[in-house]
Amino acid sequence: MRAWHDVSSTGTTGNTRNDIFVGRINLVPFIPVPIGFVPCDGRLVKNSEHQALFAAMGPRFGGDERKTFAGPKLDAPAPCLPYVMARTGFWPACN
């Protein structure tokens, strides 16, 4: 299994998909959308299939609030560079 890596603000590599925040948006240089992510194309998805993401976002971008919700619609800079949002992950600590 290939880990999802990212460069942090300090310029070091090491963030894996296991420590990504729920709802984090990434621009990825490939298609199809990676496992654990949904495309940011405004599509409706079922609350029951994306419970953590629905808990983080709610119906902010659309949906009926009971069974479906929509993610944000972000225009990709090129067809092969889609925006994706993590549907699983961890919750940030709050003070």
Image (cartoon, rainbow, N blue to C red):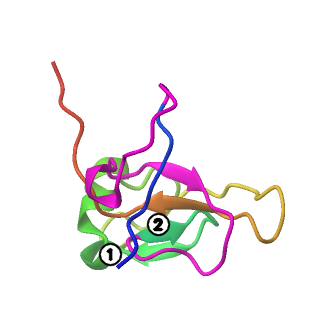
Residue 1 figure quarter: bottom left
Q: Which of 37 and 56 is in front in this view?
A: 37
Is 40 displayed left or right of 77 in the figure?
A: left
Is 21 displayed left or right of 92 in the figure?
A: right
Q: Where the C terminus falls, by quadrant?
A: top left
Position of residue 65 relative to residue 48, above or below, is above
Q: Nearer the viewer, residue 12 or 29?
A: 12
Q: Where is residue 72 in the image (x, y as percent from the top left)?
A: 57, 55
Q: Identity of the amino acid at label 2?
A: Gly
Residue at the far right: name it.
Answer: 78
Is 46 displayed left or right of 80 in the figure?
A: left
Query: Which residue is tagged 2?
Result: 63
Element under disc 2: loop
Position of residue 82 relative to residue 23, above or below, is below
Q: Does the CB distance between marks 2 and 1 fall below 8 Å?
A: yes
Q: Where is residue 41 in the image (x, y as percent from the top left)?
A: 64, 66
Residue sitting at 25 percent across and 60 percent down? Answer: 52
Q: Which of 13 and 52 is in front in this view?
A: 13
Element under disc 1: loop
Position of residue 49 relative to residue 41, above or below, is below
Position of residue 92 relative to residue 89, above or below, is above
Q: Is residue 78 magenta?
A: no
Is 90 displayed left or right of 1 in the figure?
A: left
Residue sitting at 49 percent across and 74 percent down? Answer: 34
Magenta segment boundaries in residue numbering? 9-36
Q: Where is residue 69 in the image (x, y as percent from the top left)?
A: 43, 66
Instruction: Give the Cα separation between the discs numbered 2 and 1.
Output: 8 Å
Q: Identity of the amino acid at label 1?
A: Lys
Which label was assigned to residue 52? none
- Overall secondary structure of the magenta stretch? loop
Residue sitting at 41 percent across and 68 percent down? Answer: 64
Which label was assigned to residue 67? 1
